[in-house]
Amino acid sequence: MPTKKLETLLRRHASVGEREIIALRNEYLVQIGKLAAKGAAAPLIAKAQELLKSRYWAKSSWRERGKILETVGWLLRAHETRAGNLRKEYT
């Protein structure tokens, strides 16, 4: 399932399967890894990474995991918006 569609389902609080939740978590971890490799040590990225760590993830139900992913998605979008605005100011 495409990421955008899955994110939309999570925001609508629709039923999402365990496989889709795990796939989206893995995708977010890759995205955060790429941002970290670029040197994007922003607080929003750090918080998103912290939420996906196993100590929070393992204790959560599947519904809570969906909410964690919804929050991580929001943090990543907020970071992209903020980074885009900073680029515009300096160009």
Image: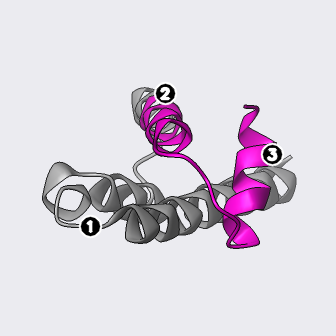
Query: If you read the primary sequence from the N terminus, does the residue marked by circle 1 or circle 3 appear first?
Result: 3
Q: Residue at x 56, y 39 (%)?
A: 20
Tag 3 residue = 5
Task: Answer above or below: position of 81 versus 1.
Answer: below
Q: Secondary structure at mark 1?
A: loop
Q: Residue at x 52, y 32 (%)?
A: 27
In this view, the mark in front (3 or 2): 3
Out of 31 and 7, give the one closest to the viewer: 7
87 to the left or right of 72: right
Question: Which three-letter amino acid code belongs to the residue tagged 3?
Answer: Lys
- Magenta span of residues: 1-30
Q: Secondary structure at mark 2?
A: helix
- Crowding at dot 3, Cα within 10 Å, few <14 / some 14-19 / many 20+, comes out as few
Task: Answer above or below: position of 51 versus 27.
Answer: below
Q: Residue at x 49, y 27 (%)?
A: 34
Out of 59 and 4, give the one closest to the viewer: 59
Q: Residue at x 40, y 71 (%)?
A: 64
Check residue 40 for magenta coloring: no
- Per the model, the C-alpha gap separating discs 1 and 2 is 26 Å
Tag 2 residue = 34
User: Which quadrant is the N terminus positioned in?
Assistant: top right
- Per the model, the C-alpha gap separating discs 1 and 3 is 23 Å
Question: Which three-letter amino acid code belongs to the residue tagged 2?
Answer: Lys
Tag 1 residue = 60
Q: Residue furthest left?
A: 55
Quarter of the view holding residue 59: bottom left
Q: Secondary structure at mark 3?
A: helix
Out of 15 and 47, give the one closest to the viewer: 15
In the image, residue 24 lies at what x, y percent?
54, 40
Given contact means CB atoms under 8 Å apart, are the residues at marks 3 and 2 in contact? no
Query: If you read the primary sequence from the N terminus, does the residue marked by circle 3 or circle 2 appear first?
Result: 3
Residue 86 visible, this orientation = no
